[in-house]
Image (cartoon, rainbow, N blue to C red):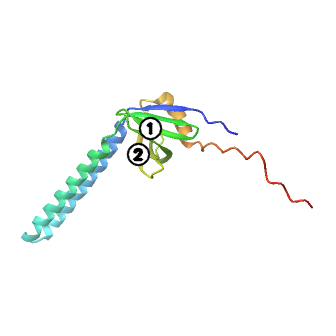
């Protein structure tokens, strides 16, 4: 039987994630502004107000979503016998199975799925944890431990 080792890593740095979130949000807002400018010229006076309202609502929603996604709480990610747990700095605990949603080499986006099918997204960057990076990658890609085989197998029929 394959032994599973205990693994623990502290997640504290999220700069790459935050920059990526704001770059995508900026691109979405730029696309909304470009759409509004194109629509503005083709609309009569009465339709221009609708274009402004739609652009403002979409831009506001984008900023709100980006603020929500950029707010990541640090904590400790552990694995023992194939069971993953994340304890946030505020004391919240989540347990479940860990999935790799995105692997960019120096950045991992992990998804911790609980039994109730709720998810916690964990952006992890190599910068700041170089000494533990290889161990983390090995741990997230390792298959779960194999259950022990039953001690007694069913008997074969006699011939």
- Find out whether the residues at labels 1 and 2 contact each other: C-beta distance under 8 Å: yes
Residue 4's quadrant in the figure?
A: top right
Q: How many numbered discs? A: 2
Front in this rendered view, residue 81 or 38:
81
* Quadrant, the N terminus: top right
Identified at 32% across, 46% down, the residue is: 69
Which numbered circle lies on residue 25? none
Circle 1 sits on which residue? 86
Depicted 118 relative to depicted 130: above or below: below
Depicted 61 relative to depicted 39: above or below: above
Give the secondary structure at mark 1.
Answer: strand
Mark 2: few/some/many CA within 10 Å (<14, 14-19, 20+): some
Distance from Cα at disc 1 to Cα at disc 2:
9 Å
Residue 135's quadrant in the figure?
A: top right
Circle 2 sits on which residue? 120
Left or right of residue 138: residue 129: left
- Lower sequence index among marks 1 and 2: 1
Depicted 158 relative to depicted 119: above or below: below
Residue 119, given in percent of the width and then of the height, sits at 42, 49
Identified at 36% across, 36% down, the residue is: 14
Residue 140, given in percent of the width and then of the height, sits at 53, 41
Q: Residue furthest right?
A: 159
Give the secondary structure at mark 2.
Answer: strand
Residue 112, given in percent of the width and then of the height, sits at 46, 45
């Amino acid at each position: 039987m394959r032994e599973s080792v205990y693994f623990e890593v502290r997640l504290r740095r999220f700069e790459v994630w935050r920059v990526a979130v704001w770059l995508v949000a900026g691109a979405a807002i730029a696309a909304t502004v470009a759409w509004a400018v194109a629509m503005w010229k083709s609309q009569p006076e009465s339709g221009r107000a609708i274009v402004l309202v739609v652009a403002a609502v979409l831009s506001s929603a984008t900023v709100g979503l980006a603020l929500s996604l950029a707010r990541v709480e640090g904590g400790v990610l552990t694995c023992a016998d194939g069971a993953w747990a994340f304890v946030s700095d505020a004391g919240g605990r989540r347990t479940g199975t860990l999935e790799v949603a995105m692997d960019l080499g120096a950045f991992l986006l992990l998804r911790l799925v609980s039994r109730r099918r709720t998810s916690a997204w964990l952006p992890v960057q190599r910068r700041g944890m170089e000494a533990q990076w290889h161990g983390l990658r090995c741990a997230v890609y390792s298959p779960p431990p194999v259950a022990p085989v039953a001690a007694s197998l069913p008997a074969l029929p006699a011939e």
